[in-house]
Image (cartoon, rainbow, N blue to C red):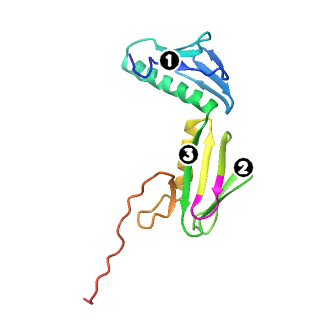
Amino acid sequence: MSRIGKQPIKIPSDVKVSVTDSTVSLEGAKGKMVQAFHPDVHIEFHQNDRQMVIKRISDEKYCKALHGLTRALIANMVFGVTKGFSKKLEIIGLGYNAKVQGKELVLSLGYTHPVHLIIPQGIKVDVTNPTNPAKLTISGSDKQMVGQFSAVIRGKKPPEPYKGMGIKYENEVIRRKAGKAFTSGAA
């Protein structure tokens, strides 16, 4: 049996749970999430001890994979609606900055034009320091959406290896390269 899939998921008392067929709906302080799962995995919610148990219908290889995946996704949903997920980004570079205008994130990244990104529904963007190094916090209840939007922002100007200018995650280590070597004397 799957080591991850066989572990029950503890559901906090302030989270509303609804399980119908292979669809799980959770509602908590940080929002509401609904997700449909593969029908080969059976999801049970035990109201008395507030635990969710995932069982598979067979021991085929794909069922074993779905078993652990389903458990991990539901655990992420529970964490998302109770505490939420966040990613922190830093924008490093002279003249680079970020600001939120309504439902748009506006980035100045050294291009001839500002980069406008529409903030997806359910995602919150906080700009704690608007100038060098600009610091952004992307937060929300859906782990996949937070990670995807962070990757889209980082993809607009990935950090370069010589001076480290660009957008990077807060604790990301950028391997630096040596610049041009100066040689004295004419050839």
Q: Amino acid at mark 2?
A: Lys
Q: Which of marks 1 and 3 precedes in the sequence?
A: 1
In this view of the protein, can residue 116 be seen by the observer?
Answer: no
Q: Are marks 3 and 1 in contact (CB under 8 Å)?
A: no
Q: Residues within 10 Å of mark 3 (few under 14, many from 20)?
A: some
Tell which residue pokes out farthest to the top in this image. Answer: 48
Q: Which residue is mark 1?
A: 8
Q: Which residue is mark 2?
A: 103
Q: Is residue 75 above or below residue 120?
A: above
Q: Amino acid at mark 3?
A: Lys
Q: Nearer the viewer, residue 111 or 3?
A: 3
Of the residues tagged 2 and 3, which is closer to the observer?
Answer: 3
Residue 131 lies in the magenta stretch: yes
Tell which residue pokes out farthest to the bottom in this image. Answer: 186
Q: Which residue is mark 3?
A: 87
In the image, residue 174 lies at what x, y percent? 42, 57
The residue that appears at 64% across and 55% down in the rendered structure is: 128
The residue that appears at 45% across and 11% down in the rendered structure is: 57
| Range of magenta residues | 127-134
Q: What kind of element bears circle 1? A: loop
- Separation of marks 2 and 3 at Cα, in angstroms: 18 Å
* In the image: residue 87, left or right of residue 2: right
Q: Which of marks 3 and 2 precedes in the sequence?
A: 3
Q: Within the image, what quadrant is residue 96 found in?
A: bottom right
In this view of the protein, can residue 127 be seen by the observer?
Answer: yes
In the image, residue 89 lies at what x, y percent? 55, 52
Q: Nearer the viewer, residue 117 or 86?
A: 86
Q: Say which quadrant the N terminus sits in.
A: top left
